[in-house]
Image (spheres, grey):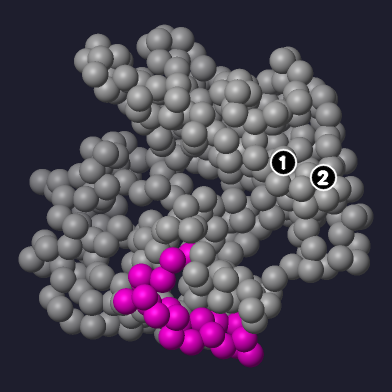
Amino acid sequence: MTQILEIDPANRLARVEPGVTNQQLQLALAEHGFFWPPDPSSAAVCTLGGNLAYNSAGPRAVKYGTVRENTLGLRAVTGLGEEIRAGVMTTKGVVGYDLTRLLIGSEGTLAIITEAILKLTPLPEAKRTLRATYRDIHAAAAAVSAIMAQPITPCALEFMDGASIEMVRDFSDLQLDDGIGALLMIEVDGPEYGLDRSTAAVEQAARVEGVVDIYRAKTKEEVAALWKTRKALSPALRTVAPKKINEDVVVPVSRIPMLISGLEQLAEQYQIRIVNFGHAGNGNIHVNLLVNPDDPDEMQRAAECLSDAFDLVLKLDGTLSGEHGVGLEKRDFVNREIDPVTLRLMHDIRRQFDPNNILNPGKGLPESD
């Protein structure tokens, strides 16, 4: 199911099958002057079906929203083999329950998505890219809060902690002082007219106490060089440890410093190296525990560290996953976040869609009593 069935610029929508990759869709839409906002870092290979199943959004979610906000309707097949149509072909519609948003993020446990109606956004005329550096995570987090409190919303607001910066020094020519404790990658997009003024407003908000430098890229080559730092993280992590336990927790933006500070304490307590980066604009931080899977003692300490990390996130009014999903790995932690009554209702819903328990059995929710 790899077809783009329809692109309708007049109504700003596209009908697609789930096997189309995110990148294939974006290239096709660009010819019409549009894009679909969700942009996971795996866009070249990830399918739209996967994006829908996990509500995977990427950096642009800070301005344009997640998959749920950019999908109008779905066709799907339930566990009984019955085809259903959810949603609408319009940007408004309140007839019946919102099964579209229910199916998105359900990880294939309710129905198999066969078609999606996606809401499109016109490509921006221009974009500006900034790199802001700070003495420590607290200053960077204060900058994130200040940026998100003013009227201009950036289209990307990415975060790297001090451990991340040190990690990529051997893979990217950072040209940064050793004392840098945190870094923000900021992009602002929109009409060319007035964009410099909008960017200046974001830059001014980013100049909080503790800022070291804010650099604005002037050419496409400089933009690519700045993003190279962020993109160098994954290969760098693979060389430091044979395995990474990669979580994508979310906390309220103002509590990012408390999250990072707590993770640093846990790293010291359990002697586990933790590297943090991610989508700061909506508090979605990728927490990476670097471990050796052949060391049973280290893996046990990592498991205890992860458990405490999840408790920390919930204590900060956060959630255990922003877009990577639950599956099996986080399934047994779900009841720490969701109360028993709500879990019971979720199991009831699941049984209505899949009474024979054939769709991704055992995934997503802890076993019911």
**Which image quadrant is residue 31 in?**
bottom right
Residue 225's disc number: 1
Q: Left of 347 or right of it: where is 210?
A: right
Residue at the farthest left position: 356
Figure quadrant of residue 64 = bottom right
Q: Does the magenta stretch include residue 18?
A: yes
Residue 54 in view here = yes
Q: Where is residue 239 in the image (x, y as percent from the top left)?
A: 45, 25
Label 2 SS: loop
Mark 1–mark 2 CB contact (< 8 Å): yes
Residue at left offset 23%, top offset 38%: 332
Q: Does the magenta stretch include residue 146?
A: no
Nearest the eye: 219 or 202: 219
In the image, is residue 106 above or below residue 265?
below
Q: Is residue 153 left or right of residue 19?
A: right
Distance Cα–Cα, label 1 vs label 2: 9 Å
Location of residue 59 with respect to 272 vertically, above or below: below
* Quadrant in the picture for the N terminus: bottom left
Is disc 1 placed on a helix, strand or loop? helix
Q: Mark 2 points at which residue?
A: 217
Residue type marked 2: Ala
User: Residue at position x 76%, y 18% from top?
Assistant: 177
The answer to whether residue 169 is above or below residue 105 is: above
Q: Give the range drawn in magenta.
A: 1-22
Q: How crowded is mark 1: few (under 14 residues within 10 Å), some or many (20 or more)?
A: some
